[in-house]
Image: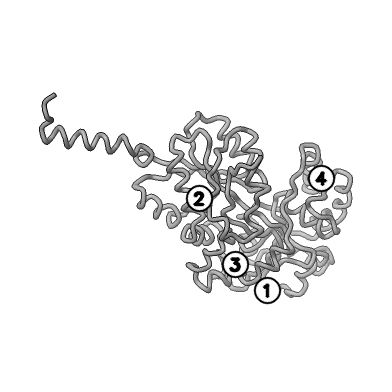
Amino acid sequence: MPRPSLPQAALTALSLLLTASPTLAKDLNALVWCDHTDPSLVEPFEEKFGVKVNLKEYEGTAAGLAILDQSQPGDWDVLVIDAVDVHRAVDAGYMAELPADQLPTADFFPQLVMAENNTKDGKTYAVTEKFGYNTIAYDKSKVDPKDMEDLNTLWSGKYDGRIAIYDYYLPVLGIIAMSQGIKTADMTADNLDQLKEPLFKLKAASKQVSDIVSSQTALATGDVDIMVGGGEYVTAVLAKDNPNLDWTIPKQGGLRWAQSIGVLKDSSQPDLALEFVKYIVSPEGQARLATASCYWGMPANSKAGEVMTPEQKTLLRWDDQPDYLARAQLYPIPDAALDTKMQDLWTEMMQK
C-alpha cells in the first residue's frame, strides 16, 4: 500500500481525532430549573469543552417527566429535579447510574448527601446540588422580627391583610403541619383535617395567594409585609435594592427544599453529561449556582464557601446552617391518595 501524501495523512489524522472524541463535538441538552439558565453558570463549562449547552426550563416534576415522556431517546442528556422526586424518575426508567466515586459528596453538608433520595438499591442516580428553605420572609422595617419566630403569629390578627401565601400546597401545608406539631414525614389522610382550621385562618388573614414571582413582587413593593413559603431564595436576590427584606425559620421549624442533578439513561452524550454534573457540584460551579440570577440558595458542597464572598455567605446565612439544618424538615412526600386530598383541601381554601 503506498504511503499517503501529506494532505491525505493530515486529513486522516483529523478524521481519527474527531471520531475519537464524539461527545465533545455535539451540544449538550439539559432539562433544568431557571437558576441553571444564568450565563455565568454555563459559559465556563461551554468554554472549557467547546460545546453549547442547550437549556430547557421547566417547573414541577410532573412537567419534567411529561417532557421526557414525549421526547425521543437521546433528546436530553441532563435532568435537574426535586431531590424528593429522584426515585420517580428512576422508577420511570429515565436515570443513568452515576459513578459515586467521582462525586465530591465527602465535601457536602452531611444532611445534603441525601442518599435515601439520590440512590436506590445501592446505586447512585443523582447528586444534590442546591438547597434552601420554604419558611417566612418579611420586611423587617414593618414587621417585628421576634413575631416571626412563632408561626401562630400569622393568624393572631396582628398582621391581617399584610400577608402573601406562596401558591404551592406542599410546602405551605407542610408549614401548617409543623405549626400543629405534626412532622411532614408523618402527614396522613387521618391528620390532614387538623390543618384545615389554621389553613383557613391564614387565608383569611392574607391579602393574596400567588405564585413566587407575584408574591416576591408584592413583598418587594410593600404591597405585603410577610410571605409564607418564602426564604432566602426570595430575599437574597432583592437584598441589594431592599436590605430590609429578611427571612427566618420559626421555632416550629421550616421546610428544606433540595434539588438534584443527574444524567439521563438514553443520553447521546453520557461522558459529557457526567462532566457537566461534576462541574455543577464542584466548588466553583456550586458558588455560581448558589448565586444564580433567578434565585439564590445554599450550595450542597460546603467547599463552595471558599470561593464565595463574605457578603454572599451572609445573605445565605452560612454560619446559621448547622442550626437551620437541624430544625428543618423535608417536603411531604404524599402517596396518590393523600396528594389528592391535599390538593382538594388547597382548592377548598382558595375558593373561600
Disc 1 designates what residue?
140
Residue drawn at x 43%, y 52% as measured from the top left: 42
Q: Secondary structure at mark 1?
A: loop
Tell me the distance, in whole angstroms, between the alpha carbons under discs 2 and 3: 27 Å
Residue count near mark 2 (Cα–Cα under 10 Å), binned few <14, some 14–19, many ≥20: few
Name the residue tied to disc 3. 316
Q: Residue at x 48, y 57 (%)?
A: 285
Label 1: few (<14), some (14–19) or many (≥20) C-alpha neighbours in 10 Å: some
Q: Nearer the viewer, residue 149 or 347?
A: 149
Horizontal and vertical percent for residue 101?
A: 53, 50
Q: Nearer the viewer, residue 140 or 267?
A: 267
Judging by the rendered image, the residue that carries numbered circle 4 is 345
Q: Nearer the viewer, mark 1 or mark 3?
A: 3
Amino acid type of the residue tagged 4 in the rendering? Leu
What residue sits right under mark 2 in the picture? 102
Which badge, 4 or 1, is on the more N-terminal residue? 1
CA distance for labels 1 and 3: 17 Å
| Residue at (27% x, 38% y) in the render | 17
Under tag 2, what secondary structure?
A: helix
**Mark positioned earlier in the residue sequence (2 or 3):** 2
Q: CB under 8 Å between callouts 1 and 3?
A: no
- The residue sitting at the front extreme is 1
Q: What separation in Å lies between label 4 and label 3 (alpha carbons)?
A: 33 Å
Lower position in the chain sequence, tag 2 or tag 1? 2
| Amino acid type, callout 1 | Lys
Which image quarter holds the N terminus?
Answer: top left
